[in-house]
């Protein structure tokens, strides 16, 4: 197979970020982020509150577009495609197509007010899925390790499930549309330890098919599940606000075992944050 | 350090009067309770009067006659008491009103909540609610003196016969109409008092209710649900139709039912603009008499207390009350049954 190593399209990174700045209104929220998310691996974003890790995550599927005051500078490439193009290309760029390929799971489980079946089928239907819907629903629910718990009540409301089940339903919903990347924004923050464990086991299975980026406050979780870890920190600005920045990004063993930066060492050892 | 509770050294500075505080609590409780009882007792008194006079009425007029007569003539020598005559008028005006208010109110609510920018929403919503503050007598005269003449002009224009030009004479059927042939549309004549303009204006008057309450319901759908839909690659339209509206459905339905209740009970607009003629049927172009309009007519007239015509207004009032009560109970049930609980 011929490979053109100079083209970003064939690099091993699913997402690559260059000199990313994000503003909310006139406030700079995150500055100077450079990182590559490798394919079929789990990358974890850790750091104290307000360090911008969720903000960076929400740039990857342009969810920040939904916040009127948010503004993004710099370059983010998804499989070689600039997802924040400028000029004429910006008008033609459709975030809806991007979100079809980059799924997301949120901090709070947010199943739709529909049946369990419809929670899965709706996303597939609006994206023009022409295959066997029953088969897709079953495959997705099995993929999210929730099939056995819900197979007899597919017609019941998704809101009737427990928090952990709701979150796995949301994961099933995300993988049903067969994205390439799944973004997880603190997916276990609202869950008990047993549900958390189930979702962590699930993530290890999912990375065979998907690239996963997870934001977490739980350092043990990051060290358990991820291959790469990015540590973000926040520093005070002259204007009295806070701006987040990427301190260090490396293999997870390095970040937790032998980090290069003093801040990282202090954070992962629990000395602050 | 001593294990005892430390007593303040400057004890003379702390002299709480626990006794008078307790007395005051009792007085406040009794006072609030008294006024609460007054408001409940008033409601009970009104319902009691309604029930009492209605029973009196049905001792003179059998229920089946009330339900099956096809005319409503309690003030004439040959008395008939067909409540459906008045009910059909109320249903007619309310149906017209709801078919105006639901699309108008719901679409404004969706626009305000989902499409309008924050400053726009903050300006437009109070403006919409100002519409709810316009006295209904103003709406009534608006219907009678502005909307009806305007509609009459349109009706007259559509009804005006159109002369067939001479060059169409080759058509076979035109020959039968020599020498002058006009094309005339079978369009109805709109009377000065009619259910149509009363219903339309009634609809406009309840639109703010539907819009404002639906907007509250739609706006309070958690942002997380919208995010979840967008993250699946849904467009704004798909998100609104399939996720936001179903999530807000109980609130939307409640607002519509409240608006129906308001339309059924609304008095001034229909009395002024719909007329005083008890006509059975659903023709919106002729004068009709709604239940509320009948109550106004008898209340303003010189009907003696205790007579049968006097008692009819209680029977009509009771029917009205039962209709709105049913609607409100249904709305209450629906909201509890279909409310989606988040968090």
Image (cartoon, rainbow, N blue to C red):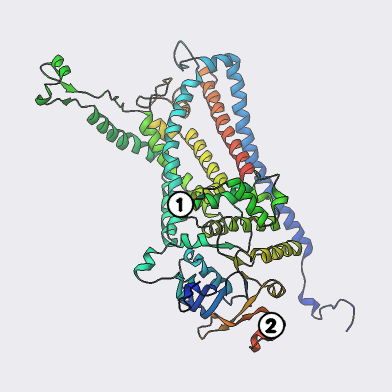
Q: Residue at x 36, y 33 (%)?
A: B197
Q: From this viewpoint, which residue is outermost toward the front?
A: A1
Q: x and y percent of residue B37 in the render? A: 67, 42
Chain where mark 2 sits: A
Vertical relation: B169 (above or below) A41: above
Q: Quadrant of the C terminus of chain B?
A: bottom right
In this image, A126 relative to B32: left or right?
left
Reading the image, the residue beneath label 1 is B237
Badge 2 crowding class, 10 Å Cα cut-off, few under 14, some 14 to 19, many 20 or more, is: few
Q: Secondary structure at mark 2?
A: loop
Chain where mark 1 sits: B
Vertical relation: B275 (above or below) B5: above
Q: x and y percent of residue B237 in the render? A: 46, 52
Q: x and y percent of residue A181 in the render? A: 56, 65
Q: From this viewpoint, which residue is outermost toward the top?
A: B78
Q: From this viewpoint, which residue is outermost toward the right?
A: B3
Q: Quadrant of the N terminus of chain B?
A: bottom right
Reading the image, the residue beneath label 2 is A272
Q: Residue at x 48, y 17 (%)?
A: B74
Is any part of residue B183 visible from this angle? Answer: yes
Name the quadrant containing residue A256. Answer: bottom right
In this image, A141 relative to B170: left or right?
right
Vertical relation: A76 (above or below) B22: below
Closer-to-camera residue (B73/B226): B226
Closer-to-camera residue (B145/B153): B153
């Amino acid at each position: 197979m011929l490979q053109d190593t100079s083209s970003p399209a064939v690099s091993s990174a699913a997402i690559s970020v260059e000199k990313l700045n994000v503003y909310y209104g006139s406030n700079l929220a995150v500055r100077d982020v450079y990182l590559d998310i490798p394919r079929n691996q789990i990358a974890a974003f850790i750091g104290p509150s307000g360090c911008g890790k969720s903000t960076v995550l929400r740039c990857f599927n342009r969810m920040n577009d939904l916040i009127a005051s948010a503004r993004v500078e710099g370059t983010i490439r998804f499989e070689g495609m600039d997802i924040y193009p400028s000029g004429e290309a910006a008008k033609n760029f459709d975030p809806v197509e991007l979100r079809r390929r980059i799924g997301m799971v949120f901090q709070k489980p947010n199943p739709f007010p529909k049946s369990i079946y419809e929670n899965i089928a709706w996303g597939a239907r609006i994206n023009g899925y022409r295959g066997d819907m029953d088969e897709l629903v079953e495959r997705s629910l099995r993929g999210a390790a929730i099939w056995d718990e819900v197979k007899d009540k597919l017609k019941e409301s998704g809101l009737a499930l427990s928090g952990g089940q709701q979150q796995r339903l949301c994961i099933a919903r995300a993988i049903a549309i067969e994205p390439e990347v799944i973004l997880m924004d603190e997916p276990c923050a609202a869950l008990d330890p047993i549900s958390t464990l189930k979702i962590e086991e699930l993530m290890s299975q999912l990375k065979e098919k998907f690239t996963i980026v997870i934001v977490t406050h739980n350092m043990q979780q990051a060290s358990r599940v991820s291959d790469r870890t990015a540590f973000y920190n926040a520093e005070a600005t002259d204007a009295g606000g806070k701006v987040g920045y990427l301190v260090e990004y490396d293999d997870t063993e390095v970040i937790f075992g032998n980090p290069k930066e003093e801040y990282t060492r202090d954070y992962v050892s629990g000395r602050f944050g | 350090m001593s294990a005892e509770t430390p007593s303040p050294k400057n004890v003379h500075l702390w002299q709480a009067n626990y006794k008078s505080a307790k007395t005051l609590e009792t007085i406040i409780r009794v006072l609030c309770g008294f006024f609460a009882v007054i408001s409940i007792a008033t409601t009970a008194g009104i319902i009691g009067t309604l029930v009492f006079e209605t029973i009196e009425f049905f001792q003179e007029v059998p229920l089946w006659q009330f339900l099956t007569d096809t005319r409503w003539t309690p003030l004439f020598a040959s008395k008939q008491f067909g409540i459906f005559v008045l009910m059909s008028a109320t249903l007619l005006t309310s149906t017209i009103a709801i078919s105006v208010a639901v699309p108008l109110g719901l679409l404004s609510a969706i626009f305000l909540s989902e499409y309008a920018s924050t400053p726009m929403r903050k300006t437009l919503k109070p403006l919409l609610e100002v519409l709810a503050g316009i006295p209904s007598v103003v709406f009534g005269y608006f219907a009678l003196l502005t909307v009806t003449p305007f509609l009459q002009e349109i009706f007259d224009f559509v009804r005006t016969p159109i002369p067939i030009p001479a060059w169409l004479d080759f058509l076979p059927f035109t020959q039968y109409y020599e020498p002058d042939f006009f094309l005339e549309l079978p369009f109805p004549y709109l009377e000065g008092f009619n259910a149509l303009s009363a219903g339309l204006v009634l609809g406009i008057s309840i639109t703010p209710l539907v819009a404002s309450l639906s907007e509250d319901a739609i706006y309070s759908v958690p942002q997380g649900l919208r995010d979840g839909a967008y993250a699946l690659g849904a467009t704004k339209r798909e998100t609104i139709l399939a996720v936001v509206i179903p999530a807000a459905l109980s609130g939307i339905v409640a607002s519509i039912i409240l608006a129906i209740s308001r339309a059924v009970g609304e008095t001034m607009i229909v009395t002024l603009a719909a007329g005083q003629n008890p006509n059975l049927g659903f023709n919106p172009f002729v004068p009709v008499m709604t239940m509320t309009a009948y109550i106004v007519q008898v209340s303003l007239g010189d009907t003696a207390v205790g007579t049968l015509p006097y008692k009819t207004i209680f029977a009509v009032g009771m029917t009205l009350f039962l209709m709105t009560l049913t609607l409100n109970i249904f709305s209450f049930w629906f909201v509890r049954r279909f409310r989606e609980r988040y968090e």
